[in-house]
Image (cartoon, helix red, strand yellow):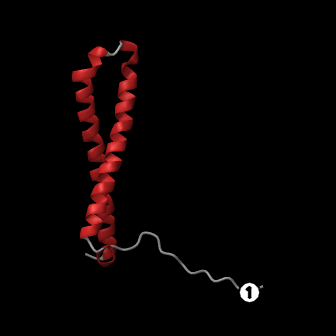
Amino acid sequence: MNKKVNTILFILGATVFNVFIAAASMILLFLLYAKFLMEHIPENGRAWGVFIIFIASLVISFVVYRVTLKFLLTKIDVEKYFDPLFVRRNIRKTGD
């Protein structure tokens, strides 16, 4: 495989991993909320718990993604296996 294919596969894998972590943390937090907290919260305030669970699962997935990415980048030589996403082009201005 060449560098472009490696880059695309890495991005797709990282996206799937991030969505999986977000979904798993949302399910886990909702189960914990339903088991321990839901009966103690008034009925009109329960929707806020779901909103907070949604935000918390996004934060958890972001943190886990960042930590995992840092770990992988220390183990993998990025320049050897991946192509840069954005290539800087040198644009030279002509003198006035």
Residue 69 at x, y = what percent? 30, 60
* 28 shown above or below 40: below
Q: Report the residue that reaches farthest toward the bottom.
A: 95
Residue highlighted by disc 1: 95
Q: Quadrant of residue 7?
A: bottom left
The answer to whether residue 58 is visible is yes
* 14 shown above or below 87: above
Q: Give the residue at x 54% y 78%.
A: 89
Q: Give the residue at x 27% y 33%.
A: 29
Residue 44 at x, y = what percent? 40, 14
Quarter of the figure that contains the N terminus: bottom left
Q: Is 92 left or right of 45, judged from the image as shown?
A: right
Check disc 1 and give the amino acid type.
Answer: Gly
Q: Quadrant of residue 51?
A: top left
* 58 shown above or below 38: below
Q: Is 85 left or right of 53, judged from the image as shown?
A: right
Comparing 93 with 67, the one in front is 67
Residue 54 at x, y = what percent? 36, 35
Residue 18 at x, y = what percent? 31, 50
Quarter of the figure that contains the C terminus: bottom right
Q: Is 74 left or right of 86, judged from the image as shown?
A: left
Neighbourhood count class around disc 1 (C-alpha, 10 Å): few under 14, some 14–19, many 20 upward: few
The answer to whether residue 13 is visible is no
Q: Quadrant of residue 76?
A: bottom left
